[in-house]
Image (spheres, rainbow, N blue to C red):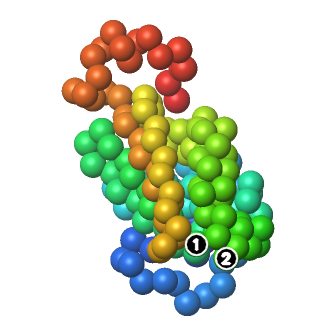
Amino acid sequence: MTRRAIYLRPWRYDSGVRASRKPDPAVSPREVKRTARTHGDVLTAISDGMVALLKEFYGRGPTRAKSYYEDDLVVCVLRGGFSRVEQTLLEGGRGAAVIHQRMEFQELMRERFEAVIERATGRRVIGFMSGNQQHPDMMCEVFILAPTDLVDIYEIAAIDRPSP
């Protein structure tokens, strides 16, 4: 079986070094559907999928992304990507309004974010938390996966979303 590259990964920053080339057009979240085979593939699918979603809905995506996946926990940290409106509000001392708007947006995007994680890991997301800060600008998305010893089986069964 020949492995075929589906897309370039211009936003991969797992090593902490920023890529030197300009990013290609946004990667559609649908293109991230491929089944990841290695831990690195999973991390790349998570980072690329999250960046693609944010680019699609904000019109501009983060400039850096780094994902972590261990046991039942996925964390994705993203940098950059404030829109011009958000940047103007920040410069005008309205940072709280930007953070509030981003938190509302992230809650609306919950199912889309969870779908990226579920496709990449093959596991069901049962918890999602999100955080933002301004200086330095960072977003952090945290996902808890089933099965986990943190949540009892009957609690997981009560969540009415189907698994991937």
Q: Do the residues labelled 2 and 1 touch (CB within 8 Å)?
A: no
Name the one closer to the observer, 50 or 80: 80
Badge 1: residue crowd in 10 Å (few <14, some 14–19, many ≥20):
some
* Residue furthest to the front: 93
Closer to viewer: mark 2 or mark 1: 2
154 sits to left or right of 27: left
Q: Residue 91 carries which label?
A: 2
- What percent of the width, then of the height, locates residue 61? 66, 66
Depth check: give the residue in front, 37 or 88: 88
Q: x, y percentage for residue 12? A: 49, 71
Mark 2 or 1 closer to N-term?
1
* Residue 78 in the figure: left or right of residue 91: left
**What number is the disc on residue 96?**
none
Residue under label 1, please give it.
80
User: Which secondary structure, mark 2?
Assistant: helix
Q: Is residue 112 above or below residue 94?
A: above
Q: How far apart are marks 2 and 1 (CA)?
A: 15 Å
Expressed as whole percent of the image width and height from the top left, the position of residue 56 reads 74, 57
Q: In which quarter of the image is residue 6?
A: bottom right
Tell me which amino acid carries mark 2.
Glu
Indicate the amino acid at tag 1: Gly
Mark 2 crowd level (few <14, some 14–19, many ≥20, 10 Å Cα): few
Q: Indicate the quadrant where residue 149 lies.
A: top left
Secondary structure under the numbered disc 1 in the rendered image: loop
Residue drawn at (55%, 90%), measured in percent from left and top? 20
138, above or below 116, in the image: below
Q: Which residue is drawn at 29% across and 23% down?
A: 151
Q: Position of residue 155 (x, y in %)?
A: 36, 14
